[in-house]
Image (cartoon, rainbow, N blue to C red):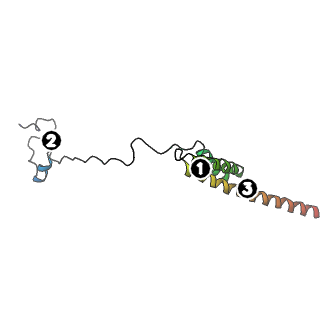
């Protein structure tokens, strides 16, 4: 009796492995090739280092920019000012602080929202002046 026949669940009358599988090896109970995968190549860069941490106000600037553009334009100038300050701090850090792309998005949204706020204020002032002129002439 062979050793593989003594294992539970193995059939005693198994056929010998085909010639293709003989060179690859015999698996536990049946005849299948043993798979051996090569070890993966080492990764790039230095191990243990990841991206730099984001600036502490990255999310604040992004949220203020989105809110300033979509919901309340009064938040947009704050995103513009805080975003410019955060961009200057990120650039001065020499690569030790990340999150520049999110701050830039919030900064640009703050500029656009501020422009919309100014245009809306001008339109409101013109509307009030025209309304006063129409009511005063009647």
Q: CA distance from mark 2 to mark 1?
A: 61 Å
- Residue for badge 1: 103
Q: CA distance from mark 1 to mark 3?
A: 21 Å
User: Where's the C terminus, which quadrant?
Assistant: bottom right
Tag 2's secondary structure?
Answer: loop
Q: Where's residue 107, x and y in %?
A: 63, 52
Q: Is residue 94 left or right of residue 130?
A: left
Q: Quadrant of residue 111?
A: bottom right
Q: Quadrant of the N terminus?
A: top left
Whether residue 36 is situated above or below residue 134 in the rendered picture: above
Q: Nearer the viewer, residue 39 or 134?
A: 39
Please report the residue visible at 47 percent of the width from the left and 45 percent of the height from the top.
51
Question: Looking at the image, is mark 1 or mark 3 earlier in the sequence?
Answer: 1
Residue 57: quarter of image: top right
Q: Nearer the viewer, mark 1 or mark 3?
A: 1
Contact? badges 2 and 3 (CB < 8 Å): no
Q: Which residue carries the number 2 mark?
A: 29
Residue 138 visible from this viewpoint: no
SS of the residue under disc 1: helix
| Closer to the camera in the image, 96 or 98 | 96
The residue beneath circle 3 is 117
**Kind of element beneath mark 3:** helix
Q: Are marks 1 and 3 in contact (CB under 8 Å)?
A: no
Could you give the CA–CA distance between mark 2 and mark 3, rounded to whole angstroms? 76 Å
- Of 99 and 122, which appears nearest the observer? 99
């Amino acid at each position: 009796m062979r050793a593989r026949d003594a294992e539970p669940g193995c059939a005693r009358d198994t056929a010998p492995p085909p010639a293709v599988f003989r060179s690859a090896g015999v698996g536990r109970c049946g005849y299948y090739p043993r798979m051996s995968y090569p070890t993966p190549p080492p990764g790039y860069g230095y191990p243990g280092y990841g991206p730099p941490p984001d600036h502490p106000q990255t999310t604040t600037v992004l949220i203020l920019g989105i809110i300033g553009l979509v919901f309340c334009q009064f938040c947009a100038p704050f995103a513009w000012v805080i975003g410019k300050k955060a961009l200057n701090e990120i650039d001065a850090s020499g690569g030790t602080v990340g999150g520049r792309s999110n701050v830039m998005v919030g900064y640009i949204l703050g500029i656009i929202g501020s422009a919309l706020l100014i245009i809306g204020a001008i339109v409101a002032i013109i509307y009030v002046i025209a309304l006063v002129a129409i009511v005063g002439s009647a």
